[in-house]
Image (cartoon, rainbow, N blue to C red):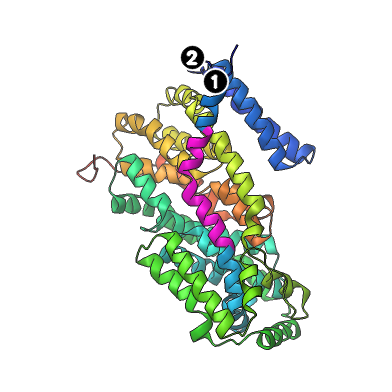
Amino acid sequence: MSLTSPKSPRSPGFLQSMICFGVIVLTIAGGLFGLGISLHALMFLCLLWVGLNAFSLGYRYVQIRELMTHALSRAMPAIYIFILIGMVIASFMHSGTIATLIYYGLSWLSPSLFLAVGLLLCALMSVATGTSWGTVGTLGVVFMGIGAAMNIPLPLVAGMVVCGATFGDKMSPISDTTNLAAMSAGTDLYRHIYAMLFTTLPTFALTFLIFLVIGFNYGEQALNLADITAMQVALASQYSLAPLITLLPLIVLAVMSIKRVPAEVTMSCSIILAVIIAIVYQGSNPIMVLNALWENSPQTTGIANLDALLGRGGISSMSWTLLLALMAIALGGVLHGAGFLDALLAGIIKRVQRTATLIGTTIVSGFLSNIAMGEAYISIILNCQLFKPKYQQHNIEPAVLSRTVEEGATMTTGLIPWTTAGAFYTATLGVDVLDFAPYAFFNYLNALIAVAMAIFGIGLLKPKQHTVS
């Protein structure tokens, strides 16, 4: 049988789709946790398995490759962000932006309030900029350094950062996932945000209280002032730390994001400004600064942890993450394009009768879609398409659909090691997903509160004139 001969493929059945998806989950879980096999190698095996399943349906090699290529083309904006974030981090390190935030942050923050205040600051920045990745790559990196100086466990700090960053990624009117969910469900953007307030604000308030209580436990331990003073002295000796100059790249990043300038342009401008500050104000070697955009190197403050932190960033630092993301997106392209996810989810949706069950099923479907496809964008589009008729049947407004899809897709994508978000958080914060996930309270409590509210009929908006065609 020719690998390239034309043939009309058939659609997969529910049983084959379940087996196909089940083998993927078992391969990744068993290989990663049981045998310690590289995640990239496991993704390659999953690609082969899904490709064989698609081939059995009548898809030729060229068609399978086209499914992967199409998925990758849709994810190109995220890939551009991957590359730019690496340069943002490296340039901010050399301009003294990160050093300034750490220096003054050590003076203003106390261990008891660090987690709660950090959560609020990350949430505010992500709402203002509309990006969880940008928040994690800037404030997140700063808080990891401050948390280490305060002897707070880094997985706990990373969990706090991810919680705050995800809040804005879900709620900001300039967030790509927020706009995508509203568009895919066929509802007005601000109606979508209004619907999310019912479940998101209570969850965020609960998360804030949790971090506040946890923070009090660390407030009682003795703060090592000698170490903090030594870190501030080291920073001051390495950098000029005038906030009005060194924080300009971060201000440009925030202002341009608020004005909805495309992320690629915004990040490029902040990178250029940071490079100029590094060369002109910090007096750094131009060649060294430009080379750092590709691969940064540790600084020489004399404090090992601080040197490693200030040496982070560069395009090369994102290569592990980027390669994993490319393979995961290609895998999702075949699963979606060949109809495996449609067949699997359609069979489940038919069995859903109660509204609360529908809400829970939508959330679980978003989570499983993230596991299978490796990123939230396709999950959002797919689940809005699949569940829209069922929500109409239950006389529930599309804004509730878009809200629930975000609670399943946007909220969980950073808790899965091989998704673009999960891999990015690990690469940027230096903490494995499985280590910080237990502390990402906001991300998984949101789903539980959403289902609980659905059981009691709270926040289930009925159709009005707010939908769009």
The part of the chain drawn in magenta is: 68-86
Residue found at x 68% / y 58%: 431
Residue found at x 57% / y 65%: 87
Q: In which quarter of the image is residue 113?
A: bottom right
Q: Residues within 10 Å of mark 2 (few under 14, many from 20)?
A: few
Closest to the observer, 277 or 373: 277
Give the side of residue 180 with respect to residue 279, left or right: left
Q: What residue type is labelled 2?
A: Lys
Residue sitting farthest toward the front? 287
Q: How crowded is mark 1: few (under 14 residues within 10 Å), some or many (20 or more)?
A: many
SS under mark 2: loop
Q: Nearer the N terminus, badge 2 or badge 1?
A: 2
Q: Distance between the residues labelled 2 and 1?
A: 8 Å
The percent coordinates of residue 415 (x first, y second) are 59, 48
**Image: 174 above or below 14:** below
**Residue assigned mark 1:** 60
Residue found at x 48% / y 28%: 337
Give the side of residue 469 with respect to residue 45, left or right: left
Q: In which quarter of the image is residue 139?
A: bottom right
**Image: 286 above or below 427:** below
Q: What residue type is labelled 1?
A: Arg
Residue sitting farthest toward the right? 35
**Residue assigned mark 2:** 7
The percent coordinates of residue 74 (x first, y second) are 45, 42
The percent coordinates of residue 312 (x first, y second) are 67, 67
Secondary structure mostly taken by the magenta-highlighted segment of the chain: helix
**Image: 20 above or below 464:** above
Queried whether the magenta region covers residue 288, the answer comes back as: no
Question: Disc 2, disc 1: CB below 8 Å?
Answer: yes
Give the side of residue 115 with respect to residue 366, left or right: right
